[in-house]
Each structure stands twice: as C-alpha cells, then as structure tokens.
Amino acid sequence: MARRRLGSRSSRPRRFGSVAGRAGVAGRATALAALLILAGALAVFVPYLLRKRTFTAGVPAPPPLYTVAEYALAPGQRACMASVAVEPGARVATFAARPAAVAPSSSSPASSPPSSGPSSATASAAAPRPPVELTLRARGYAASALAPGGRGYRQLSVAIDPPSHAVLASACFVDRGSAPVALDGSNEARTVSRSAMTVAGAPVVGDVALAFTERPRRSLLSELHVLFARASALTDGLVPVWLIWTLAALVALGVPVATLLALHSSLRQDERAASA
Amino acid sequence: MSASVETAAPSLRPLAAPRPRVRRPPRALLLILAVAALQSLAWNLALPAFQGADEDAHFAYVQHLAETGQLPAVSGNGAPVSTQEHYALTYLNLFPLRGVLAARPAWSAADLALMRRLEASMPANARADGSGPNAVGNDPPLYYALMAIPYIVFSGLPLLKLLFVLRLFNALLYLTTVALTWTIAGDLFGRVRWKQVLAAGAVALLPQLAYMSAVINADSLLIALTTAFLLCALRLTMRGPTLRRVLAASVLAAATSLTHGRGLVTLPVLAVALLVAWVRHRPSRARVAAQLAASAGTLGGAALLYLLFGTAAGTGAAYGGQVHSLTSGAGFGVGRFLEFVYRFYLPKLPGMGARLGPEFGYRQVFIETFYGAFGWLEVRFKPRIYDVLQLASGLGLLWLAITCAIRRRTLRGGWPQVTVMLCLLLVNVLFLHYVSFRALLGNGGSDPLIVGRYLLPVVSLFGLAIAFTIGSLPRRLGSLAGAGVLAAGVLLSLTGVAITAVRFYG
C-alpha cells in the first residue's frame, strides 16, 4: 500500500521549468542564503569584532548575586585576601567603597558575617569617603595604588603595575583616611571566591569584590588571542591555542559554507531526481 | 571462457558471496552533521567547565557511578561533589562563576599551576567521595551509566581534560538527534532532500540544542531517545505493527523513562501509537495479543530495572519522590490549572484572580530559553533578537495553521502520523505545565521550574513543522524561504557561541 507523504503534493519532487531553470532554483536559494549570512555577518559580527571595549584581566572575587555585604574598616585598618591571581595584563583594579558611619570596634569574626544589605553602618550618600590603598604582594612582585577619597558610594578604579608573569598574590585594602570606610563584597555561599579574607588580622566570611581590567580599550578582534589562550587554559592545555585558532576559523567559515553546500546539494539532488 | 567453466563445473559456488551494497549517507546529511559537530566543538570551548545547566551535579553523578559503581544519594550528610570536583569549582572560581555575569573563571597560568598541584596531592579517594546529596540524584541512571564508559576509559586524565572529552561523547547524542530528524523527515515527506535538509538543519542550528550538546546533562540522551522513539512510533503507524517495530518503540519508551522523569511522557504516546497502528493496519487478534505482551513485558522489565535502581539509590519512592510530589499536595484544582495554563499564553481576563507565580509564560519558555539562554541562563541574546524570534515564531505558527487548513486532505490521509506527532507534542507540553503548576503550588509561587530546554525532546517536531510549512509552498518560493530560515539559524548559532565566549573569557 502506498504510504501518504505529508507536506508534498506527490511523493516525488515536482517537475518544473527547463533544465537551466531548475538549476537556477538551487543556485538562487543558495545565493540568497549566502547573501543573508554575509549581510548578517557585516551588520552584526564585524561591528561586534571591531568595537572597542574594556576586557577583564581577572576577577579574583565577584560581586554578589543578590545581596551586597559591606566590610567596614576603621582608619588604618586593613582587609586582606589571599590567593588573588594577578596577570601581566591587569592594569586597573576595580572595587567599590562607601563611607561607613560607625567605625567597627574590631573585625567581624568568621562566625558572624559582616553586615549586609543597606547597612545601618553606612553613612549618608553625601558623607566623606576616605582614601583606600590597595596593595598587591607576591614573591618577586609588589604594587600599590591609592584610590583618593571623595563623597558617598563609588566604584573605584585604580591603576596598578602588573607583574611580568601571572602570580598568586595577597591583596590588601587599607583605610588611609580619618573616617571608617565600607568595602562592597559578598558573603553569599553562592558567590564567595577561593580567596580567604581577614579584616584586621581576623578571618571573616566572604570577600571584597575585586576585578582587574586591561587597558586601553581594545577590539575583540585584536584580543582574540587572549580569549583563546584563556579557553585553552580551561581545557588544561588539552586543546592548544593554535588548534583553537584553527577550529575558530573552521567554525566561522565551515558552519555557513557547509550549510550552504547542504542546501545546494539537496536542491540539485531533488532536481536530478525530478528530471530522471 | 567463463561459459566453459560454467558448463564444466555447474555446481561450483562462487568463492565469495557478492558484497551487499552499503548505502552511503547522503552528502547533504553529512554536511549538516559536520555543521553540528563544528558547533558542538565551538560550544565545548566557549563554555568553561561546569557552566552548563546543572553540569556540576550531572558530572558528579557520572563520576560517582564510574568510580564506585554506586549511585549518589538524594539526601544525607555526604559531599554533593567529589573532592576533585570541589577543588576545581573552588580554586578555579568555577562555582561563583555560575550565573554571575561579572565573574570570570581563574584562567591564569598561576591558577592552573595551583590546580595541578592540588590534583597531584589529592587523597586516593578524592574522585570517589562525592556520595551525595546530589541535586540530580533523583534521575534514573541510564545516561550516567552510558557516560561512565568514556569516563572509565579516560579516567587517567586530569579533571578539565576529562570533562572536555566527556562532552565530546555527549555531542554524539546531538548528532544522533540531527540524523534521526533527517530520517523522520525522509519517512514523512519522501526522499525530498531539501525538506530533509530544512528539518535537520533547523534542529542542528537551534542554538539551545547545540549548546546542550556541550553540557554533561541527562537531557542530551533524553532528547536523542525521544527523537528515536518518535521515529519508531511513526514507522509503527506507517509501515504496520510488526513484533520488531513494537519492541523497538517499547524499548525506546522504556529507555527514555530510565533516562529522566520527563521521559515518562513517551508511555502514553506509545499506547496511542500502538492503538493507531492496530486500527490502521488491523492485524489479527493473536498478533495484537503478542505485540501487547511484548510491549508490556518490555515496559515491565524496565520498571523492574527501575525498582532495582531505586533500592540501590536508597530511595523507595518513584523518581526520588518526584512522582509522588506531582500527584499529591493541596491546592490543585482543574479550573485553577486551566486558568494557570491560559495565563501562561494570554493576558488576564476580567474576573480572573491573582496570578500564581511570577510573570512567566510563553515568551520565557517557548522563545527565550528555547532558542537560547546559555550558561546558567545568564548569557542571553539582546531583547530585540528575542522580539524578532517571537514575531517569527508567531507568524510561523500562523503559517503552519493556514498550511494545515489548505493541506487538510493530505493530513487526513496521514492521520496516523499526525495523531502520533500531535500526541507527543501535547503530552509533553501539558506535562510541563502540570509540573510547573505543581511546583508553584509547592514553593509558594517562587519558582515555575520549567525552562525552554525541556521542550528539546520534541525538537524534531520543530524541524518537521518548519519543513512541512515551507515545503508546502511552491518549490521556488519554498526553497528561498528555506534558505532564509537556514541563514537565520547560522547567524543565531554563531552569535550564541560568540556572546558566550566573550562572557566567560572577555
């Protein structure tokens, strides 16, 4: 019994037009697909690859997902995080600080996490914010930078001297003013990093959110080798960087080209079947 | 000369039997599979370890099963992941990376050196001590048992390398899904290659599916098995219910049920497919009885296997209590459920009460997390891309409805296939609504639980619907429309990989 096919008026491809005309169906469809892909690439991928942007050079401690934890420091006190990776590309360190109304009598012990959310210890938005010094130390490497004081909450970015090769450093924030300061961080189990932290020498739960960025702003195209090196590192070197370059070229060209060839080949095959 | 030989020794048998002709796979299929393979490789590199949906828990399940031969516990006071995985999640900052856009993995040479030192100094049981509670410990073990094979073969590799290799094996399930969609399209539309390319290409170029191919997750096997089941169920109705076909469909339905709780949706579809096949082909009562016995025996055997699994996992309840939670609890009412389903798709009507749960519906499930939301759902396309996809999907559905109306005679002639496909789609969608409704009742309306990737087991229907709708156009116009769909798929897929790579490494 002949089976009924869905979606075709007969079980065989319809015959239509001359041989030249039929060959044109495959060609026209493939050309249209190629044109659309090319137009899309020019409209989307080329600007995406060429737009200048700031690239991350590492995030030792990310910000929280839901609730900000504040780590308050009295004048002269320091909060230190261990095992902070600093790379040669790290030129700017970014963290957030705000004035704290009440100076902490001592550091928060690990068993009692610091205040979080809109803390009562936070001063008014216009209150003066003391300067904060960031120091980075590892074997054979030391750098420091001072974020000047100001008023209210601020995302602070300070220029740092990067190491010549990647190091695991200690990062310390020191209140260099005469008023207490609160540093933004996370004590959520979900976002606490590996970097153990102490405030005034006592261990606390969580970390101060800290990120390093590269400078100057660059295009994605010029930074691809860095991205590929990072991807390679996270395969533990199983896929070397040169192979990622090869695969990237294969994917960028191979996916569209193979799709076009599949479309063209199928239409031509149907045409041959129809004319047979 | 040959004639004389033949007359002299007529009884001589040829030295070798003629070789059976091996059918080469069609070139277009190989090309579509190449597209899929390239995409999967790209996703494998763009997505750092454990950044796929629940990948940490799924890997922990595979590892514990492969290392100890035992399933991880659903509850208890043990470790949810092994010491080795814990090291990677902690010291490479892969745990705080999950879902937090501002976070980055620890990628520097110093980080990697630290990880290598830790792995070198791990205690002997550091790979085997992730006994649970495992977040996906409720899942049946089929996928994990399958993935345990490459795990054991490559177990000498350090964790990051091992995970990369396991993802390559996982990708085979994606390629299988694409090839099966091609085959189903061939069965339904005849050997019209461009329709097969359109159906398989639409599936291969769906960014969410390509992304899932690079994530250790039982969904990959569920998707491949459900697609294989659909193929067998369709053949059952189209070619007639032989014992072999009934067994094949039953084994696949059983396998999907042993892969994930969501695989249970194939069981009612199997029943419908058998009924339709018997009505359509009218076999003798004796044959029907034999086929029914074979099917029931297969499913019974699977249930027995499952009971053994339940005992081994230390859970007496079906699917770790998930089935019980779906059939018990207060607050369920048919009217309320229907209103919930209505509100999922359409705006509030006068007289309707407060919505159960957050603003979550068609857009979030059928568009955003079906076409593409990557990582732990934090990597997304720009909203305007989802707007375009929603518009295109709406127009596509309208176009499909019009095509169905125009081609109603053809569809009526193919009613057995249409019934099976509709049944699979509706049961799947209804099941997801029911699960979501029950979850919202249970968690006070905080988490609707379902996401678009739960629709991927019926992804072949997505490709087939596109091929049917576009394939019903006049051929010249249809081929151009198909070219447009494939071009859009290419752009969307490559964009998905690019934004994910930049999110994690940029």
Image: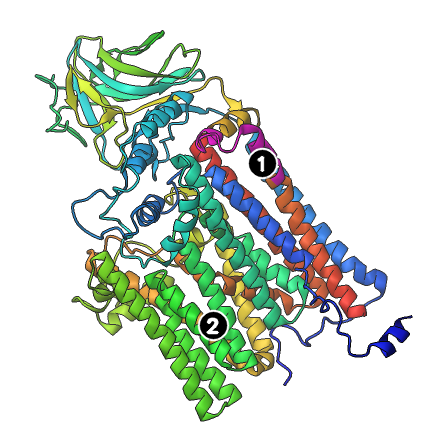
Q: Which mark is residue A248?
A: 1
Looking at the rendered structure, the number of numbered marks drawn on it comes to 2
Pick the front one: B112 or A138: B112
Of the residues tagged 2 and 1, which is closer to the observer? 2
Pinpoint residue B408: horizontal percent, then vertical percent.
57, 79
In the displayed structure, B445 sits above or below B48; it is: below
What residue is drawn where x is 65% and y is 52%?
A: B31
Task: Classify the position of the N terminus of chain B by image quarter.
Answer: bottom right
User: Which span of residues is magenta-colored?
Assistant: A231-250
Quarter-of-image position of residue A57: top left
Q: Secondary structure at mark 2?
A: helix
Residue B472 locus on image (x, y percent): 64, 70
Q: Is residue A211 magenta?
A: no
For badge 2, the amino acid type reads: Ala
Residue type, numbered disc 1? Ala
Mark 2 crowd level (few <14, some 14–19, many ≥20, 10 Å Cα): some
In the image, taking residue B375 as reference, residue B174 lies left or right, namely: right
User: What colour scheme was applied to this rendering of the protein?
Assistant: rainbow
Left-right relation of B506 to B445: right
The circle drawn on residue B248 is 2
- Residue B361 horizontal/vertical position (percent): 36, 58
